[in-house]
Image (cartoon, rainbow, N blue to C red):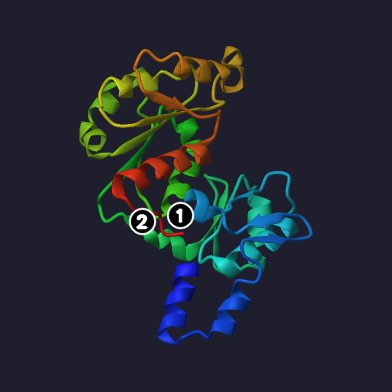
Amino acid sequence: MIQELLVKVSSGACTVADALAELKNFPAEMLSCAHLDHHRRLRTGVPEVVYGENKTAAQIVEILKKLLQLSPAVMATRVSQEKGEAVCLEIPGLVYHEAARMLTAQKEMKQQGADGGVGLVLVLTAGTSDIPVAEEAVVTLRCLGHEVEGLYDVGVAGIHRLLSRRDLLDKASILIVVAGMEGALPSVVGGLVDKPIIAVPTSVGYGTGLGGIAALLGMLNSCAPGIAVVNIDNGFGAACMAASIMRQITGRAGVL
């Protein structure tokens, strides 16, 4: 955002006074319900993202409207469909992604492949029930401007499904592997590829799955070395880790 303003000032498309007016709430801004960190992307590569659970639709609207003033794109995670629809009515151009339970700015969803084919993030799930967590990762990565593909329902109960897509495994630069139950899929993938693997345990499973703890412990005790593990159901966190690695691989930031 600052770079764009500097270019506009340099070209005469924007006056110094106008630029200062746009930056008056930079790097931080206090709202009635939140203290926004507009400087976060410059420090970390990932912008301020709204965690929507337990926030009201009105609070999400207030925050997103302010974020959109300083960024062409926004994200809100863990937003119920009811709240998502209410927010979309107040802010034209937002899109609600039902599976991912996320709100994003529509224009940013056109940025898929912004890395120009330099790096692909592949998101795998063990089962169909793991797709919501995987979609949170997919939507986040696309909004951050990275190329991403999904490969779903390829768990160890039918390992031939995974092996039949070795082309995608070989093509990917980073793999996010999402699994519930015993959480075995990341170990299998870890024995097939020489790429960074980010494992995401999900809360999918029966009684002794303990809401994802069994999958989490299985992934932490993987016999395949070098697997990173994020928290239960944390597709967003996995996407941010993948984006951070991708910035090192490609030498460029995302589009936000």
- Graded by Cα atoms within 10 Å as few (under 14), some (14 to 19) or many (20 or more), the crowding at tag 2 reads many
Residue 143 image label: 1
Return the residue nearer the eye: 105 or 157: 105
**Is 102 left or right of 11, judged from the image as shown?**
right
Identify which residue is drawn at 56% across, 53% down. 40
Return the residue nearer the eye: 186 or 251: 251
Residue 136 pos. (x, y %): 50, 43
Return the residue nearer the eye: 212 or 4: 4
Q: CA distance from mark 2 to mark 1?
A: 8 Å
Can residue 1 be seen here? The reply is no
| Vertical arrangement, residue 8 with respect to residue 42, above or below | below
**Is 43 left or right of 153, judged from the image as shown?**
right
Number of on-image labels: 2
Residue 167 pos. (x, y %): 20, 36
Residue 112 image label: 2
| Vertical arrangement, residue 53 with respect to residue 212, above or below | below
Return the residue nearer the eye: 17 or 90: 17
Can residue 248 be seen here? The reply is yes
Q: Secondary structure at mark 1?
A: helix
Type of the residue with mark 2:
Gln
Residue 71 pos. (x, y %): 53, 65
Identify which residue is drawn at 71% across, 62% down. 62
Q: Secondary structure at mark 2?
A: loop
| Vertical arrangement, residue 231 with respect to residue 207, above or below | below
Q: In the orientation shown, which residue stands out farthest toward the right?
A: 32
Which quadrant of the view contains residue 162? top left
Type of the residue with mark 1:
Cys
Q: Residues at badges 2 and 1 in contact (C-beta under 8 Å)? A: no
Which quadrant of the view contains residue 112? bottom left
Identify which residue is drawn at 58% across, 51% down. 49
Identify which residue is drawn at 34% across, 44% down. 248
